[in-house]
Image: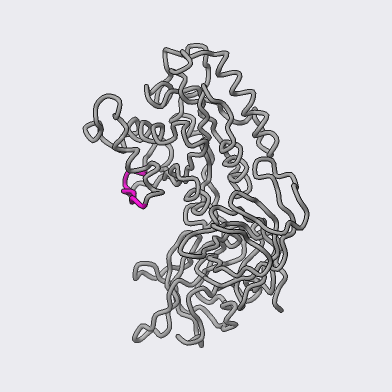
Amino acid sequence: MAKAKEHINLAFIGHVDHGKSTLVGHMLLEAGAIAEQQLDDGENKFRFVMDKLGEERERGVTIDLAHQKFSTNKYDFTVVDCPGHRDFVKNMITGASQADAAVLVVAADDGVMPQTKEHVFLSKTLGINQLIVAVNKMDVVDYSEDKYNEVKKDVSTLIKSIGFKPDQVPFIPLSAFEGDNIKEKSSNMTWYKGDALIPALDKLNAPEKPLTLPLRVPVQDVYSITGVGTVPVGRVETGVMKQGDNVIFEPAGASGEVKSVEEHHEALPQAEPGDNVGFNVRGVGKNDIRRGDVAGHVTDAPAVAKEFDAQIVVLQHPGVITVGYTPVFHCHTSQVACTFIELTKKINPATGQVEEENPDFLKTGNSAFVKIRPTKPMVIEDARKIPQMGRFAIRDMGQTVAAGVCIAVTPAK
């Protein structure tokens, strides 16, 4: 069997009207992920794809995931963000689809807009370190090199302010609608000497598996299997699990030796990040552990938080968030009600600068540093040390009201 290509999760970010959906649609077409006959003619050419990928997500229309995958010569890609801003942030933070790289779409006629700044800042906060800038709608500005340079200068200033190095970021002038510079170099912009978008994607770096981080396996379910015993099931987020390892489940506190590790009913010598495994641990019974517990090695056990500090973004809240507010935090597989015990600092979402110390309340659109106390023991880790275990979404009233990353943990013991 041929070795599978390495995989990259790719986010498309940027202001809502700057043509992200059209670009994703045209790129999928050029990459052969969707067929020409699936598209309408004329003005609505990419409507089909846009309906699948576009703003309709906000209204609850589902996406056919098959149309989010495409391959280049070097990599297999999954498009993780589709335009809904709130979905993007929620997905990014809950880690359901942690992006490895982002394409920032900026329209040549509009330039940098507030949402452009917010998306770039958020993606950096959430750990995206690879960026490609697509200067879109070049057809609207008559393929003007001056206009491209103007946008490039503004975007360079923006991304530099949050830690990207503009000279290492490709700026690609393109037209998502006309198809210029998506797969091949466009004759409309002979002044541009760099790569088209798809070849530029092949120059990204695939993420390294977090093999050297401590072992963390959040438990999704616990089964009793005749002849085997108790089998917790979960996805290995970081580290490596081998038969014979001594593991502990936190916050349950149950521990024992790993007797077997299986994936799809086949025994594995070891399980690595990304593997969905079932494993049997000597001396651990079905009632000792539950969904939301996290397995790790006894020598470097998962952190159980008494309190933790976090940076959050309020996505949509009908009222205000104040000290004492206790919504449900979704972190890896756990769902625990947690109380806001301190609103430490309110920060500007576009620059990261502190706007107010100890604000009285937070509302939709605010970004802030806060201190949180779980109502019962839960595992959460400093996202700077183990990013996979430090992201969370905050839900209340049937919606995701905020999302964030943990930046420090006060351990329970």
Question: Is residue 359 shown to the viewer in this render?
Answer: yes
Q: Position of residue 64 (x, y in %)?
A: 31, 48
Residue 404 pos. (x, y %): 60, 57
Residue placed furthest toward the left: 37
Residue 216 appears in which quarter of the rendering? bottom right
Camera-nearest residue between 215 and 266? 215
| Residue nearer the viewer, 408 or 262 | 408
The quadrant the C terminus occupies is: bottom right
Instruction: Specify start and end residues of the magenta stretch as a single range.
Output: 60-69
Q: Residue at x 70, y 48 (%)?
A: 347
Q: Which one is in front, 402 or 133?
A: 402
- Determine whether 61 is above or below 176 in the image: below
- 131 left or right, relative to 4: right
Q: Position of residue 244 (x, y in %)?
A: 53, 77
Q: Residue at x 51, y 78 (%)?
A: 258
Query: For this rendering, which residue is in front, 343 or 71?
Result: 343
Coloring scheme used: one colour
Q: Residue at x 52, y 63 (%)?
A: 395
Q: Residue at 66%, 70% (x, y): give it.
A: 324
Q: List x then y, in percent, for residue 36.
A: 25, 31
Left or right: 66 as drawn, with respect to 94:
left
